[in-house]
Amino acid sequence: MREIMKTKLVWLFWGALFSAATAAAQTPAPLLQNGLARPGIWLNGDWHYVVDPYDEGVRRRYPLNLSPAASTGVVEYDFAASPTLHVPGDWNTQRPELLLYEGTVWYEKSFEYHPRPGWRSFLYAGAANYRSQVWVNGNPLCEHEGGFTPFNCDATSLLKDGANFVVISVNDTRHADDVPALRTDWWNYGGLTRDVGIVEVPDSFIQDYSLQLQRGTGNRIAGWVRLAGAPATNRVTLDIPQLRIHREIPAPDGKATFEMEAAGLERWSPDDPKLYDVTLVAGNDRITDQIGFRTLEVRGTQILLNGAPVFLRGISLHAEAPLRPGRAHGDDDARTSFEWARELGCNFVRLAHYPHDEHTTRMADRMGLLVWSEIPLWQGIAWTAPGVSDKARRQLEEMIVRDHNRSSIIFWSITNESAKSAERNAFLHELATAARSLDGTRLITAATNQSSRPEPHKMVIDDPLIADLDVVGLNEYIGWYDGVPADLDLTSWSNPYDKPVIVSEFGGDARQGLHGDPSQRWTEEYQEDIYKHQIAALRKVAFIRGIAPWILKDFRSPRRQLPSVQDGFNRKGLISNNGEKKKAYFVLQQFYREAARDRGAATRSDGR
Ligand code: GCU
């Protein structure tokens, strides 16, 4: 009897300790700008994992990393004896039994760490899809919601000198009031899908900074630096050696603002993706970033890059690895996908339908690809459900804060194919306003499929949402979901708004290697015919200032199950999931070559 009572008391003690601890998890700290380049240690590599479909882990105290020898209770898990998953990486494509798994997976990493006296240590994650909770040495640290943006949490008080362990639970169960909601047309890759590490900053540190080229013909750089932590320093040093710029800038109340001429500045563009090393120093904190400088504006239905009209020769991409199954991450995946896009003749990529990783947007800076970046407000969203607007606003903010220094990014997109309604229009009006307050230098767009068709073959590009946009994204599938390719020859296009239009999606499915008559759906010839008719139609419409056909590569989707044709993949790619080009690829490539040559001729005549 005494033994039973003792065991019960132990359970009660641990249970009380753990439930109190779990309740204390915080929201993440403000995002550290350029986290990838800060000092610290990466925890990428193999993490032990426990699959937890019934969410036992909280009740069983998984985060305490107890091993059976350490407890008088029964412990029915042991991280050290459990298998491993590679981080970064989705769990779906690392274990066959996890391909369709949706639920909770517990990750654990033990590591040696030596905190720096006078410095703070943040646990950083590039993304964790979809909900995550973080414990350090068995103590709750923070939790985050949103599957595609980074977060960092101050772990200084929880990390020890020597042996440490981190436990992160990730749950990717879909919910109607999440962003995205229950239904998407992409695979719900769960897990620690991007870099995880400990990022270190001195007690007084640089939180965020912005440097932009002011609109207009001059070369004036304007910007700011925001300091945080102990208010030890109140000045910032800015260096851009290649422009012979060195400035000592006061930072009253922790914020330095500046404006300066940059004689001889080379503007960033797809033809010349010039990046400058920018070094900021504040007290013991020193950050170097690579930043491009360009101007961006709209004039009527024209998009002007560095003052000259630009036609966006684009392609859409999901964040799927080009040469292996699963979620893309890191420089190699980004470089390969963008090499394919460059080979196609692109100067523009639509990174659909959620923020891709920071390696990708930085690669676009380096390789000279203009970028459309978006949050996953995809189709059906619970616009009026409690908390949904906060979730959307937070994901928008995390996307913009992370990338507002990337010269390649020209569009922030706030929704994809959401149906018109008073609630949706009001929700998106607020979100567009928020986007402009977060970043007044980029163009706000969205991909709408809500155009009206007053009669067959008449496309009127009207959606109340457009009033809130600088540039209109139009998704249209004439020839696939909507009639046949020849209908495009008869279609007229009207744009009641004096705003540029980008056709942000068109296309159709083809199984690579399936050949037949162009009238036969699912053949490469049918897809090729769609592209021929789409291009012939769109190139004649002056207010269409770019296209981003759907999509560079076939991608996994649970909704695409036609045997021996789709087999779990959306087949609208110009390249198969095995890297094989389809016939339509060459039709688009030919058009882009002509467009680039014509632009070159036009540019020469413009004298630019
Ligand atoms: C929609 C949607 C895409 C989807 C595509 C399709 O336009 O935006 O996410 O994959 O159509 O049906 O293939």
Image (tube, grey):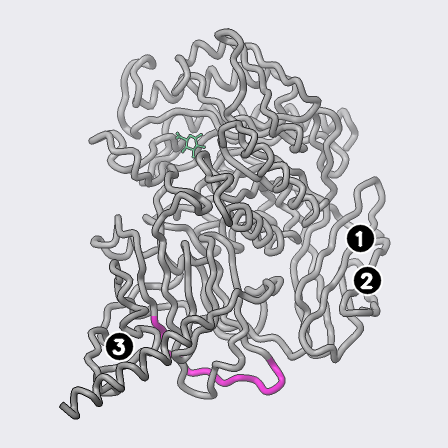
Whichever of labels 2 and 3 marks the residue nearer the N terminus, that label is 3
| Ligand 1 within 8 angstroms of badge 2 C-beta | no
Residue 202, image x, y percentages: 64, 78
Crowd band around label 2 with a 10 angstrom C-alpha radius: few (<14), some (14–19), many (20+):
some
Residue 559, image x, y percentages: 30, 35
Q: Nearer the viewer, residue 53 or 444?
A: 53
- The secondary element bearing badge 1 is classed as strand
Residue at x 67% of width, y 31% of height: 310
Name the mark nearer the viewer: 2 or 3.
3
Is residue 120 in view? yes
Of the 4 image quadrants, the one containing the C terminus is top right
The segment highlighted magenta reads 108-119
- The secondary element bearing badge 2 is classed as strand
Residue 221's disc number: 1
Name the mark nearer the viewer: 2 or 1.
1
Furthest residue toward left:
1
Q: How far apart are marks 3 and 1 (CA)?
A: 53 Å
- Residue kind at label 1, given as amino acid type: Ile
Residue 245's disc number: 2
Whether residues under marks 2 and 1 lie with C-beta atoms below 8 angstroms apart, the answer is yes
Q: Which residue in the protein does label 3 denote? A: 80
Q: Distance between the residues labelled 2 and 1?
A: 11 Å
- Residue kind at label 3, given as amino acid type: Ala
Whether residues under marks 3 and 1 lie with C-beta atoms below 8 angstroms apart, the answer is no
Q: Distance between the residues labelled 2 and 3?
A: 53 Å
Q: Give the vertical position of 346 relative to 213 (above or below).
A: above
